[in-house]
Image: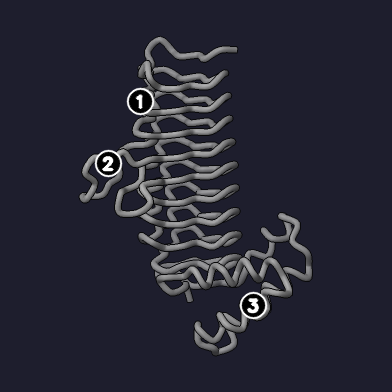
């Protein structure tokens, strides 16, 4: 099968489309866009800017992908958006390109499930196999690790980092970082244990989950300062790769962590 472009779609002649790409009615593909093999672009989708998209992605109607960043400092620099492969991007999503004040790149990884009305702002870095429920909103410069689940209407302040395998409840407001494996909810947000059920489903051993529980207690229940808990958890990292992941997320925390 070759590229299938609906007669009402507008595809710039310099755009690069892979094999088996379909573009639905009234969609617009810009000059600097590259779309990989087997992607499906639904009706009324706009993909613009310096945007590179991998294979087997599906974009649902009314999404805006690769538009200029919503940053008053933006002065037309050719910043980029990169999207990996095997992502589902539902209705009314908005992904912006990066800014020159950061790395100039907004990046979304592979196998992500992005539900309706999600906003991924400039310079965000999103890992693999995440789930963003409806209306999850990322401000600029947010970093999201692999396997993160954001509940519906989760709102994330700029520069916040969300560690791998963590999870938020519906309506969570994040002004501070979420360490790996931690569940958070509320406004202001607070930690509520570890994402044990998710870890079981992903094949974490009972021993690893127990180690993560122990580290969580050190961080949240021991009465130690954040600095003291970081040192103790770092010492535990040699016993478990999972604890190493948690320790690294604590080291990377720049805004403090949810408590």
Q: Which residue is under mark 2?
A: 77
Kindly indicate whether the residue at mark 3 contacts the one at mark 2 (C-beta within 8 angstroms): no
Q: CA distance from mark 1 to mark 3?
A: 48 Å
Taking 82 as reference, is 202 above or below it? below
Q: Which residue is mark 1?
A: 30
Q: Name the N-terminal-most of marks 1 and 3.
A: 1
Instruction: Tell me if mark 3 has few (under 14), some (14-19) or many (20+) residues whose alpha carbon lies within 10 angstroms of its own.
Output: many
Residue at 41 percent across and 46 percent down: it is 106
- Measured in 3D between alpha carbons, the distance from the residue under mark 2 to the one under mark 3, in whole angstroms, is 44 Å
Q: Is residue 140 left or right of residue 199?
A: left
Residue ID for mark 3: 215
Task: Tell me: 113 left or right of 156.
Answer: right
Q: Is residue 220 visible?
A: no
Residue 143 is marked as none
Mark positioned earlier in the residue sequence (2 or 1): 1
Q: Secondary structure at mark 3?
A: helix
Q: Is residue 221 left or right of residue 122?
A: right
- Splitting the image into 4 quarters, where does residue 242 fall? bottom right
Count of marks overlaid on the render? 3
Q: Residue 248: where, in percent of width, then height?
A: 56, 69
Which image quarter is the N terminus in?
Answer: top right
Query: Of residues 19 and 136, which is closer to you in this image?
Result: 19
Identify the coloring: one colour
Furthest residue to the top?
7
Q: Is residue 232 above or below residue 212?
A: below
Residue at image point 45% right, 28% down: 34
Residue 100 visible to the viewer: yes
- Packing grade of label 2 (10 A; few <14, some 14-19, many >=20) is few
């Amino acid at each position: 099968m070759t590229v299938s472009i609906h007669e009402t779609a507008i595809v710039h002649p310099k755009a690069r489309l892979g094999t088996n790409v379909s573009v639905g009615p009234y969609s617009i593909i810009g000059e600097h866009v590259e779309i990989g093999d087997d992607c499906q672009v639904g009706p009324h989708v706009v993909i613009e800017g310096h945007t590179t998209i991998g294979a087997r992605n599906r974009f649902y109607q009314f999404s805006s992908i690769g538009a200029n960043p919503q940053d008053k400092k933006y002065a037309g620099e050719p910043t980029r958006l990169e999207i990996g492969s095997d992502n589902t991007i539902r209705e009314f999503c908005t992904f912006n390109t990066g800014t020159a004040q950061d790395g100039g790149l907004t990046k979304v990884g592979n196998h992500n499930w992005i539900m309706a009305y999600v906003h991924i702002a400039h310079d965000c870095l999103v890992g693999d196999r995440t789930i963003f429920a409806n209306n999850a909103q990322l401000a600029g410069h947010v970093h999201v690790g692999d396997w993160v689940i954001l509940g519906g209407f989760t709102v994330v302040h700029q520069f916040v980092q969300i560690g791998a395998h963590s999870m938020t409840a519906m309506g969570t407001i994040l002004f501070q970082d979420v360490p790996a494996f931690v569940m958070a909810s509320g406004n202001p947000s607070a930690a509520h244990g570890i994402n044990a059920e998710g870890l079981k489903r992903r094949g974490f051993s009972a021993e690893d989950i127990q180690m993560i529980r122990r580290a969580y207690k050190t961080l949240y229940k021991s009465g130690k300062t954040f600095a003291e808990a970081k040192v103790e958890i770092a010492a535990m990292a040699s016993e478990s790769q999972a604890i190493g992941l948690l320790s690294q997320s604590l080291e990377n925390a720049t805004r403090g962590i949810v408590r």
